[in-house]
Amino acid sequence: MIIASILDSAFISTFALSAVLFGSWFSFWYKSNLARTEKERAYVCTLLSSSVTSLCSIPLVYTLLTNGGDLADIAAYRTWTVIATTFFMTFLVVDLVIGVVFYRSKIDMLTGWIHHITYLLVLSWGIHNQLTAVFIMMCSLEVPTFILALGSVRSELRRDYVFAATFLTTRIIFHAYAIKCAWQYTAGFIKQQIRLAAKRKQDSVASNQAQRQRSKQQHIQPSIVSTATISSETTIKKTTISRNNKTTSASTYLSSPTPQFHQSPPVSVH
């Protein structure tokens, strides 16, 4: 099954189920008074989203690290990455909707509305172009977000050194490595397109030469036929003239007077 549009029934179903999950998750924290302050409520949905997407990124990160940095393997279509991407897109919408009601001061214009809406547009484009696997791989950058959210909803779980270590490992080191792989992939793609363009040009030149050769042969062939026709007509004319000459000679001979034969006197026999 290939999901290539946000209007696909699979996307809509996943979005609806994810929305129910996020709503239930937030309701549990809010009604059980586990998220007491506005800051804690602001990180409840982030905690769930970052934990799921970080886990989903592990197999793709492992693939990139073990295949020599070949991003082509990562870019291959995987349906489960579309579902995971839809889950994250649901979080973006739910975070804005719930945030307006329960933690309005934490939803500012830049990191809230602009950030989330931009992500929604980019990920919609990614689904259409079947590039969600690359996004899910880069969700490994959500690991420090998970550590931050965990420390925000429960201050006793805050670990600044863990956050710093995961931030350095994922958002700086791995991010730089992924950019390098992306550059190599892009450079290889460009070189491939150049080779294909050169091959198409060579094929076009060869095709044009073959076409000119065929046209030349077609031009020469009528000339040969014309020459043969003229030669044949000349032969026929010569044959006709020869026959006419023979007929004329025969007619002249037949119309000439009969020659007088010499009659010798009778011979007497003694």
Image (cartoon, rainbow, N blue to C red):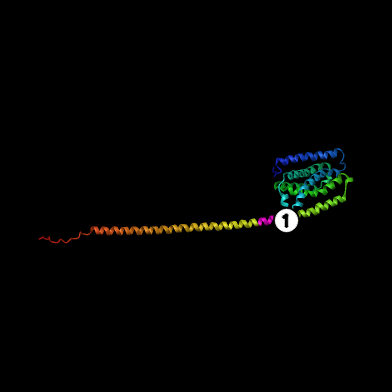
Task: Give the quadrant of the C terminus.
Answer: bottom left
**52 and 33: which one is in front?**
52
**63 and 20: which one is in front?**
63
Name which residue lies at 68% across and 56% down.
Answer: 190
The x and y percentages for residue 108 are 81, 47
Q: Quadrant of residue 265?
A: bottom left
According to the picture, the residue beneath numbered tag 1 turns out to be 184
Residue 265 falls left or right of residue 236: left
- The span picked out in magenta is 180-194
The x and y percentages for residue 33 are 87, 39
Residue 87 falls left or right of residue 244: right
In this view, the residue farthest toward the left is 270
Q: Main secondary structure of the magenta part?
A: helix
Please tell me whether residue 187 belongs to the stretch shown in magenta: yes
Residue 118 visible, this orientation: no
Residue 226 falls left or right of residue 109: left
247 lies above or below 111: below
In this view, the residue farthest toward the right is 156
